[in-house]
Structures are given as structure tokens and as C-alpha cells.
Image: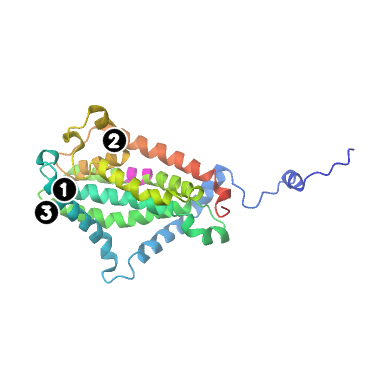
Amino acid sequence: MTGEQVPAAEVARRAGLPRLGGRPPLVDYSRDLWERRALLVELARSRFRATNEGTRLGMAWVVIRPLLNAAVYGLVFGLLLPAGTRPDNFVPFLVVGIFVFQFFSGCLNDGAKAITGNLGLVRTLRFPRALLPLASVLQQLLALGPMMVVAAVICVVFGEPVGLRWLGLLPALLLLATFSAGVAMIAARATLHIRDITQLLPFVTRLLFYTSGIFYAVDRVGLPRAVEVVALLNPVHVYIALSRGALVEGQAVDGSTWWLGVGWALVVLVLGYLFFWRAEERYGRE
């Protein structure tokens, strides 16, 4: 016997006592997340209702705001850009692009604040913290539904024929939501460690807006081939292209774009989930 005192932490570990606030195994964490899906839905719904409660038009702003954006950008860029960079059905082309980007940017910005904006909740209650960025994505999905209904009506008004291709909108939006969930979790953890990221997000969002082909056709602006390939691989552009392919005639996409959409969604979701989970024990302590 050496008489050395065994550290209390080692004694607790041998006794099978879990560390308070420690990171649970990935399988247990995922199971706990699934079991609390009702909380996820309620968080998203309550935040969605509260978004515009204090305004006269209330939830109508969910649709009015992106419509105003589309009108402003359509007026400005419809006059400034050469006609050759725009498709003939420019209004449906623009509206679908604006609405899809509005969803993505909302997921990115709200996801970045998911932990830092809810520290009181994080520090007082035990639950899988991934619920918070995922609730932000679900909240944006609740807003996206009526927006896409309006987009479909606009497409019909401007002469877009309704056809079976419209069924492709649902998988396109599901892939977009999956990708955005991964982005939201990455942003949530990154912002916790480096708060200054929130100051950079508006510039990142603006850069993505102007480089994702929202108000111009990427393959018609005369970009150098290498730059054009990078622009076409941009995941935000991929999901905009998939959504346009469903609603806008003449914007059909090939199978490679669908594979890109699937690949971006799965890779970013898995990486984002693992990246977020690995810091689970640090949320609320930094």
C-alpha cells in the first residue's frame, strides 16, 4: 500500500457515476433528442407565432416581407441587368429564388443565436442543446410553407403551367431544410466560441445573396468557366435551382444537380450534428 489518495473523480468514475453536465454518448444523445421532439415542435411554433405578434398585419408579414424584397430587387436588377442575363419568365424566377434564400438566411442567422440567445434556458434546464438550432430551422419551415404557396400562385399568374414537375418541390425543400439544419448547428456552436461571428454574418449572407444566382442566370452572365463551376456547385444555388426546376418552366435540372443537393444535405447535416454534439458539455458554461 502506498497510502496515495485516489482522486474523487476517479472514485466516481469507478462507481459508474456520470459527470454532471457531461457529454452523453452520441446514440443516447440522439435518442434523447428524438424523445423530446414535442418540445422541438412547441418551441418552433411559439417562436413563429411571436415573431410578428406586435404588428397590425401580424403573420401576414411572413409573406409580405419577402414579397417586398422580391419587388425591390426585381425593380432594381430588372432595370440594371442586361436582358440576356435574365430568363423570359423573370418574375417567377426571381420570386422562387428570393423565397428560398429567405429561408436559408433565416436558418443561418437564427441558428447562430440559438445558444447565445437562450443562455438562461440552457443554464437552467437539462435537454439536448441541439433542440435550439433545430427549432430555429423548424420555425423557418413554418414560414416557408405560406411563402411557397404564394410563390406557386405568382407562377400561375405569370403563365407557368401546373404539371407533375411541381411535385419535385417537396423533396427540393426537404433537402434544403436538411442542409440548413446542419448549417444552423455549425453556426450555433461557432458563435458560442467566437461571438464576433455575429458581426460578420450579415456580410456572409449578402455575399451568398449576390453569388447564388437569385436575380440572374449563372450560366448566362459570361463568367470564366472555373468561376461558373464554383458558382454552380454553391449549395444555396443548388437548392434554388431545384426549387425553380419544379415551379418554373424552362428551369429544369438534371440528375447531377439532384445528387449535389443530396450530397450537400447529408454531409453538412452529419458534420454539423457531430460538431455541435462534441461541445454539448460546454454550452451554458462559456
Q: Is residue 38 above or below residue 85?
A: below
Residue 20 % position (x, y): 65, 52
Label 3: element kind: helix
- Closer to the N terminus: mark 1 or mark 3? 1
Label 1: element kind: helix
Reading the image, the residue beneath label 1 is 77
Q: Amino acid under label 2?
A: Trp
Q: Please say whether residue 177 is one of the residues in the magenta stretch.
A: yes
Dot label at residue 258: 2
Residue 272 % position (x, y): 45, 42
- The quadrant in which the N terminus is found is top right
Span of residues in magenta: 174-179
Label 2: element kind: helix
Rate crowding at label 3 as few (under 14), some (14 to 19) or many (20 or more) other CA atoms within 10 Å.
few
Most foreground residue, 196 or 252: 196
Residue 54 appears anywhere in the view: yes
Most foreground residue, 188 or 127: 188
Question: Residue, x 39% and y 62% (percent of image)?
Answer: 47
Residue 219 % position (x, y): 19, 34
Reading the image, the residue beneath label 3 is 157
- Closer to the N terminus: mark 2 or mark 3? 3
How far apart in space, not on screen, are marks 1 and 3 (Cα)?
Answer: 21 Å
Image check: 194 left or right of 23?
A: left
Which of pointers 2 and 1 indicates the residue nearer the eye?
1
Q: Amino acid under label 3?
A: Val
Question: Residue, x 55% and y 52% (percent of image)?
Answer: 283
